[in-house]
């Protein structure tokens, strides 16, 4: 379940309810449909309402700079925001150029991986 | 302008100038490097700029980043800077909460010089104020 493991991690949680967990998974699966054919995207995880209210989509991608991230993610973010206009959704690419250590490691203990392919 | 609007603009400019100071070439080689903090400070400079506009025009003070982001996304007054604000939100969140996140100096500089500048200019023009030169 999204966010459950954070209960013992010391991270602040914002009342993640089962409904929010289902919503986060719904958003994650919808984003997987949008992004799955992009060859530079290798993995997707979702978390919700951990540090701040919102749904967070973590993408393991090929290395790239911030400009390339925005170019890659812009259209996909537009689509997911259109589909879920009431949600605060951040898409967070993680790769060798912006991550200390192995970017393939899940971003949070409670992150749920969404199959891409 | 309402005093609270002025306060938001003052804090925005202060954060902007603090981020600029951390990017000053005279601090080259500063250890540990401050680039993630530049991203955080720059994001909050944008937050206060947006807050200034929302307060001045509607006496509205968003209570979450989600509420504020929705305003920037949906309000035509912000259309020229929505993509920049979204980038600042994304990188700002990463820099605040992910202990393994890192930025380069060039990326931190672009956040300020390109993305914050777009937010600041949009807000100042919408408020009928001169765009600061820096």
Image (cartoon, rainbow, N blue to C red):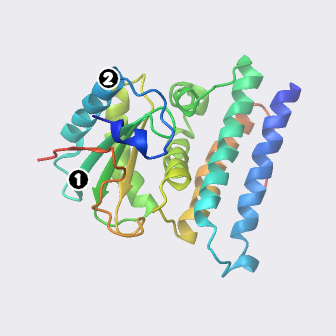
Residue A22 point in image, percent of width and height: 28, 25
Of all chains, the one bearing label 1 is A
Q: Badge 2, how many Cα within 10 Å: few under 14, some, many 20+?
A: few
Q: Is residue B130 in sight in this rendering?
A: no
Q: Badge 1, how many Cα within 10 Å: few under 14, some, many 20+?
A: many
Residue B83 point in image, percent of width and height: 49, 43
Residue A43, label in figure? 1
Residue B13, label in figure? none
Looking at the image, which residue sits at the far front? Answer: A8
In the shown orientation, is residue B83 left or right of residue A24? right
Say what secondary structure mark 1 lies in. Answer: strand
Looking at the image, which residue sits at the far bottom? Answer: B29
Quadrant (top left, top right, bottom left, bottom right) of the N terminus of chain B:
top right
Say what secondary structure mark 2 lies in. Answer: helix
Circles 2 and 1, Cβ within 8 Å, touching? The answer is no
CA distance for labels 2 and 1: 24 Å
In the shown orientation, is residue B50 left or right of residue A64? right
Q: Quadrant of residue A102?
A: bottom left
Residue A18, label in figure? 2
Residue A78 point in image, percent of width and height: 37, 36
In the shown orientation, is residue B27 left or right of residue B114? right
Q: Are marks 2 and 1 on the same chain?
A: yes
- First in sequence, mark 2 or 1: give its number: 2
Residue drawn at the location 64% of the way across and 60% of the way down? B38
Please identify, in this view, whether the residue under mark 2 or under mark 1 is nearer the observer: 2
Residue A30 point in image, percent of width and height: 23, 33
Q: Nearer the viewer, residue A28 or A50?
A: A50
In the shown orientation, is residue A60 left or right of residue A99? left
Q: Nearer the viewer, residue B22 or B1?
A: B22
Residue drawn at the location 32% of the way across and 23% of the way down? A18
């Amino acid at each position: 379940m999204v966010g459950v493991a954070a209960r013992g991690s010391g991270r602040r949680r914002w009342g993640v309810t089962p409904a929010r967990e289902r919503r986060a998974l719904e958003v994650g699966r919808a984003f997987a449909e949008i992004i799955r054919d992009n060859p530079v995207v290798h993995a997707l995880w979702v978390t919700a309402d951990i540090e701040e209210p919102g749904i967070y989509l973590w993408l393991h991608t090929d290395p790239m700079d911030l400009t390339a991230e925005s170019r890659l993610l812009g259209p996909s973010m537009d689509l997911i925001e259109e589909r879920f206009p009431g949600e605060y959704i951040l898409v967070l690419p993680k790769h060798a150029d912006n991550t200390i250590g192995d970017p393939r490691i899940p971003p949070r203990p409670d992150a749920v991986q969404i199959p891409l392919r | 302008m309402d005093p609270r609007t002025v306060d938001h603009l003052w804090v925005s400019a202060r954060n902007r100038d603090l981020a600029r100071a951390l990017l000053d070439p005279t601090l080259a080689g500063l250890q540990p490097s401050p680039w993630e903090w530049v991203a955080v400070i720059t994001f909050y400079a944008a937050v206060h700029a947006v807050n200034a506009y929302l307060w001045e025009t509607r006496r509205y003070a968003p209570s979450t980043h989600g509420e504020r982001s929705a305003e920037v996304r949906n309000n035509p007054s912000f259309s020229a800077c929505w993509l920049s604000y979204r980038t600042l939100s994304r990188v700002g969140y990463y820099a605040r909460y992910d202990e393994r996140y890192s930025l380069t100096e060039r990326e931190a500089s672009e956040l300020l010089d390109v993305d914050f500048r777009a937010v600041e200019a949009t807000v100042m023009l919408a408020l009928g104020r001169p765009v600061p030169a820096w």
